[in-house]
Image: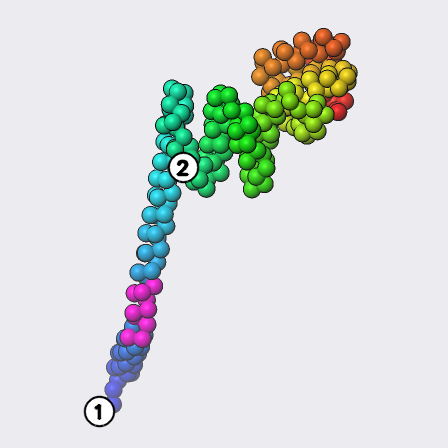
């Protein structure tokens, strides 16, 4: 018996749905395991990233605590206890902690009347081109300060002149040493202008600014704001 139109439509729809089910079943048989594996790998990747992030934060926290306890040991005169912690940080491969460790060890050596050792530690930072420039500049300033009395004045100027620029991070300390070296080199006008520029720079510590103003005055340079500004803009 012939099917009515409505029955034909129902029949075709049922056949179409059956075909779709067969196709989906075939796809699942062929690709189902791969899909499950993909989901598992995705979840594992997320879990691995979360674990890695937590471990990194944990390690950072441990290094921070190690640095804190090392500095506490140094401040309380327990250098022997601080040394292995500082060595650990120096070998951690983390730039900030390595620099902090070397700087602290240099201070310990300087305080312990071992200037050569201190200079050697600071030179490790100053000569390391993989480190950010501000760290290297700081090490150069501190190293020069330790060697200042033994260095020829012109070497002080050559080493620190790039840092003795108004607005630079270490302008106060570097500029003061360059100005004193200029005095030794019989260049009082250049020294006075530089002292005046230091006195003008609000970013320089107040004690250093006061000392610079006095030095500028002793060299015949008025370190009032207007004149100090003129000295700063004249350059070296």
Q: Quadrant of the N terminus?
A: bottom left
Foreground: disc 1 or disc 2: 2
Residue 13 vs 99, above or below: the answer is below
Look at mark 1 in the image and give the residue it sits on. Answer: 1
Which residue is rendered at x = 76% and y = 22% of the image?
234
Q: Is residue 31 magenta?
A: yes
**Considering the numbered disc 1 on the image, is that residue within a helix, a strand or a loop?**
loop
Q: CA distance from mark 1 to mark 2?
A: 92 Å
Whether residues under marks 1 and 2 lie with C-beta atoms below 8 angstroms apart, the answer is no
Residue 59 vs 21, above or below: the answer is above
Tell me the magenta residue range.
29-38
Residue 121 picture location, percent across and down: 52, 32
Could you classify mark 2 by the number of other residues whose Cα lies within 10 Å: few (under 14), some (14-19), or many (20 or more)? some
Residue 74 picture location, percent across and down: 41, 23
Q: Which label was assigned to residue 88? A: 2
Tell me which corner region of the image, top left, top right, bottom left or bottom right, holds residue 123: top right
Q: Main secondary structure of the magenta part?
A: helix
Horizontal side, residue 58 vs residue 119: left or right: left
Q: Tag 2 or tag 1, which sits nearer the N-term?
A: 1
Which residue is rendered at x = 70% and y = 27% of the image?
155
Residue 37 picture location, percent across and down: 31, 65
Q: Which label was assigned to residue 96? A: none
Q: Quadrant of the C terminus?
A: top right
Which residue is rendered at x = 45% and y = 36% of the image?
90
Q: Is residue 28 magenta?
A: no
Which residue is rendered at x = 58% and y = 13% of the image?
206
Could you classify mark 1 by the number of other residues whose Cα lies within 10 Å: few (under 14), some (14-19), or many (20 or more)? few
Residue 81 picture location, percent across and down: 36, 28
Q: Report the residue that reaches farthest toward the left.
A: 1
Residue 55 vs 118, above or below: the answer is below
């Amino acid at each position: 018996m012939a099917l009515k139109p409505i029955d034909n439509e129902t029949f075709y729809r049922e056949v179409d749905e059956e075909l779709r089910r067969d196709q989906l079943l075939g796809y699942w048989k062929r690709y189902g395991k791969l899909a499950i594996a993909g989901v598992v790998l995705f979840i594992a990747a997320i879990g691995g990233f979360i674990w890695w992030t937590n471990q990194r934060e944990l390690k950072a926290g441990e290094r921070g605590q190690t640095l804190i306890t090392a500095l506490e040991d140094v401040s309380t005169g327990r250098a022997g206890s601080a040394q292995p912690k500082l060595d650990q940080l120096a070998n951690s491969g983390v730039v900030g902690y390595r620099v902090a460790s070397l700087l602290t060890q240099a201070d310990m050596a300087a305080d312990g009347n071992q200037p050569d050792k201190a200079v050697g530690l600071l030179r490790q930072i100053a000569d390391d081109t993989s480190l950010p420039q501000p760290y290297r500049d700081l090490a150069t300033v501190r190293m020069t300060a330790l060697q200042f009395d033994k260095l020829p004045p012109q070497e002080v100027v050559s080493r620190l002149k790039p840092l003795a620029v108004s607005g630079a991070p270490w302008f106060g300390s570097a500029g003061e040493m360059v100005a004193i070296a200029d005095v030794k080199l019989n260049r009082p006008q250049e020294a006075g202008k530089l002292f005046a520029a230091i006195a003008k720079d609000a970013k320089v510590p107040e004690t250093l600014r006061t000392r610079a103003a006095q030095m500028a005055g002793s060299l015949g340079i008025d370190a009032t704001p207007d004149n100090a500004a003129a000295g700063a803009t004249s350059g070296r």
